[in-house]
Image (cartoon, helix red, strand yellow):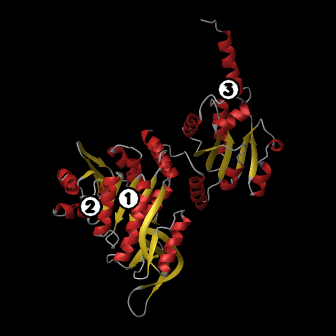
Amino acid sequence: MIAQQYLDKWTNLHVLAIGEAMLDCYLEGTSNRLCREAPVPIVDINSLKDVPGGAANTAANIARLGASVSFLSVIGTDLEGDRLKRTLQERGISTHNLIASTQRQTLLKQRISSDSQLLLRCDRGSTENIDPQIENQLIENLNRLYPTCDATVISDYGGGILTPRIIQTIAQLQTQYPRTIVVDSKQLKNFQFVNITAIKPNYQQAIQLLEISALKGKERIQQIVDWGAKLLDLINTQLAAVTLDAEGAIIFERNNPPYIIPSHPTSNSQATGAGDTFVSGLTLALAAGAAGKLAASIASATAAIVVTQPGTTTCSLSALHQSLSGNQKLVVSRESLVTSIQEHRNWKHKIVFTNGCFDLLHLGHVTYLKQAKQLGDILIVGVNSDESIRQLKGANRPVNCLSDRLAILSALESVDYVIPFAESTPSELIKIIRPDIYVKGGDYTPEMLPEVPLIEELGGEVKILPYVSNISTTAIVNRIYQTFSKLPSI
């Protein structure tokens, strides 16, 4: 797909992210009784989870989508600031440019849930403008980092980081070093002189900017469409992506008609930070050279992935690749594999694993895979990479490239997942999958399989299925060569 070509460029991009860093804290417990002092539930907390929030979540999304990120923000010299730094470091994001101020409290959003039902959110932290000394440090960092980046994303939550002097500095740097620059702000008018590439207001921010009345439901779509041109002019931007929650998003681009991206309905009501994910995907896609319509579609796909997950979360590059490929059976990373395996374990599914080259898929393969699936609930197929097949079969193999082999296997009803591997054996995959049953064809014996001791050590069982006689890829290839060798030369 065309979109995949731009995703492949993201690992070479360096993005500068600036805005309010927040700590999102999730307290989860159970509630079976009411408080004596008031008719409110008592929650017995059994887990606490800290994740980056606000602009820190934007930085985390950029990093997980494969780009390198420099994150500029200000926190307090408090416990919450230390916890926030730890969450960023755990995600491979440097906190070197995170300024700690004794005059500020780190922004905290603390959510309390009982049996996955959100009961209460408590907010705390400094929201007044940063003082001149901190402002000078931030400007110094901006001047140093801006020329080195490929794109800048501004996540302005109105918490005092994007002061007039900071915005003026960004405008001057953008004039001197033009970059892709995307702004997500509650006060977009403050950025109308920055030469912005794109903005991402939600519906409330858009109508506030346009000074028009709020509507409900699908009526909002036509309302915003009618005001799109003015929205671009008000902020002096090339692209505006107005998000409308259940109604999706409307994309406005100069000299092009509006484009509506439908929403991806989800039953998860606790997903937060999808806007940060959208902005991250939009920034990277535009910086990689994607046109506005395609960039917005990629951004929407990233947001669609995170809204299916609870809490403040991020979208991985591998998950986005898989989503855009249209092949839901293809697992493109070991990380995605771990997640899928855990889901099936939770459902008590019996997992069957097999592996092979599967070059020139034939009746023997189809019969074998159908029999393998009948041994359990889920069949996962590890597929040798092209290079590993060349090492096993010679320079003339494979006949079909890896992407073709994966697509053909995915089309089989018996196959639930396909995952490529480049190692000489599938041992690393086996350690992740821990299959209940490991299957090979009748042309093997247990003594021929180096994986058998590992399978048994992990508590699995090895099954050798009957071999379909007189059918093999090698035999087919040899017959083709023989046939062509007998043809008269032209």
* Sequence-wise first label, 3 or 2: 2
On the image, the x and y values in percent for residue 265 come to 37, 56
Give the amino acid at mark 3: Asn
- Which sits earlier in the primary sequence, circle 2 or circle 1? 1
The answer to whether marks 2 and 1 mark residues whose Cβ atoms lie closer than 8 Å is no
Return the residue found at the far bottom: 37
The answer to the question of whether label 3 and label 2 lie on touching residues, with beta carbons closer than 8 A, is no
Depth check, front residue: 52 or 42: 52
Q: Is residue 313 left or right of residue 172?
A: right
Cα separation, mark 3 vs mark 1, equals 48 Å
The residue indicated by pointer 3 is: 396
Q: Earlier in the sequence, mark 3 or mark 1?
A: 1
Q: Amino acid at mark 1?
A: Val
Residue at 23% from the left image edge and 57% from the top image edge: 235
C-alpha separation, residue under disc 3 versus residue under disc 2: 58 Å
Distance of label 2 from label 1 (alpha carbons)? 12 Å
> For residue 148, which quarter of the picture?
bottom left
Q: Secondary structure at mark 2?
A: helix
Question: 10 Å neighbourhood of mark 2: few (<14), some, or many (≥20)?
Answer: many
Q: Determine which residue is flagged by label 2.
A: 191
| Residue 404 x/y as whole percent | 56, 34
Residue 254 can be seen in this image: yes
For badge 2, the amino acid type reads Phe
Quadrant for the C terminus in the image: top right
Q: Is residue 332 left or right of residue 229?
A: right
* Residue 251 vertical placement versus 24 (above, below): above
Element at badge 3?
A: loop
Q: Is residue 162 above or below residue 366?
A: below
Nearest the viewer among 135 and 378 is 135
